Amino acid sequence: MAQAIEEWYKQMPVITRSYLTAAVAITIGCSLEIISPYHLYLNPKLVVKHYQFWRLITNFLYFRKMDLDFMFHMFFLARYCKLLEENTFRGRTADFFYMLLFGASVLTGIVLIGGMIPYLSASFARIIFLSNSLTFMMVYVWSKQNPFIHMSFLGLFTFTAAYLPWVLLGFSVLVGASAWVDLLGMIAGHAYYFLEDVYPQMTGRRPLKTPSLIKALFADEDVVVARPENVRFAPPPAEELHRD
């Protein structure tokens, strides 16, 4: 069993493995009171006035207490982050990292701007960790990339992947969780989908082109299909056909 888990972990692509490791380590550290969540949550005043810039990152790594909700989000993170990195972004690790960076920036911007809007500021002030929203963004992007895959929800009913975010949103409402967290993830995911897939088809321009600086951080390997030995892809010359 332990060996199977180790192999599963080692086979994860680099971004998925790194994010999952950091999220589990920090959440466990907070549960054991080794790390204080008060040093991790998003606080604009502490970021700007006290230069605690790490909060812009750590608020995406803490998934609250270790309960059933934590297990669900670790499953979503391990599954859909891996599916995106291995399939949609195969051989494009830098582009995948840029997608996460874009999503984190959009989510942070929404919370900061929303905190300045009257009648909404109180709701946004309660959103101090965006880890669940970033995970939900990955689910949304994956559903847009694979809209016709058939899925089942707890064996109760089937649907196509295009409706997965809405099914999960409805489930969150039913169990009494905040819908804001999932909605923010959907907004960030749709912003990325529109700018990366829809807008380029409309205008021929790609506004989310990955910067060369980020590409330099990742040495992506080309996907090469090896040609088997002694396999012909064209008929042999006529003289070989008549040779004894």
Image (cartoon, grey):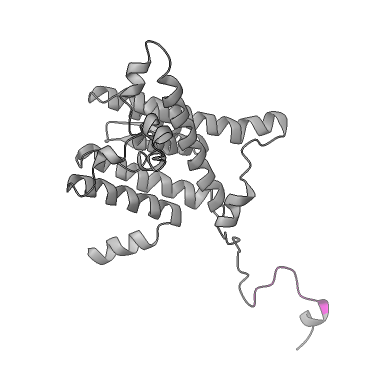
Q: Position of residue 238 (x, y in %)?
A: 82, 77
In the displayed structure, 188 sits above or below 56; it is above
**The C terminus, quarter of image:** bottom right
Q: Nearer the viewer, residue 157 or 170?
A: 170
**Is there any visible trace of residue 63 in the rendered image?**
no
Q: Position of residue 203 (x, y in %)?
A: 71, 30
| In magenta segment, residue 126 | no
Residue span colored magenta: 230-238
In the displayed structure, 124 sits above or below 91; it is above
Q: Residue at x 38, y 33 (%)?
A: 133
In the image: residue 158, left or right of residue 146: left
Q: Quadrant of residue 80?
A: top left
| In magenta segment, residue 233 | yes
Q: Position of residue 136 (x, y in %)?
A: 39, 35
* Residue closest to the far bottom: 244
Q: Position of residue 156 (x, y in %)?
A: 27, 31
**Is there any visible trace of residue 228 in the rendered image?**
yes
Q: Nearer the viewer, residue 164 or 48?
A: 48
Q: Nearer the viewer, residue 144 or 35?
A: 35
Q: Residue at x 55, y 33 (%)?
A: 193
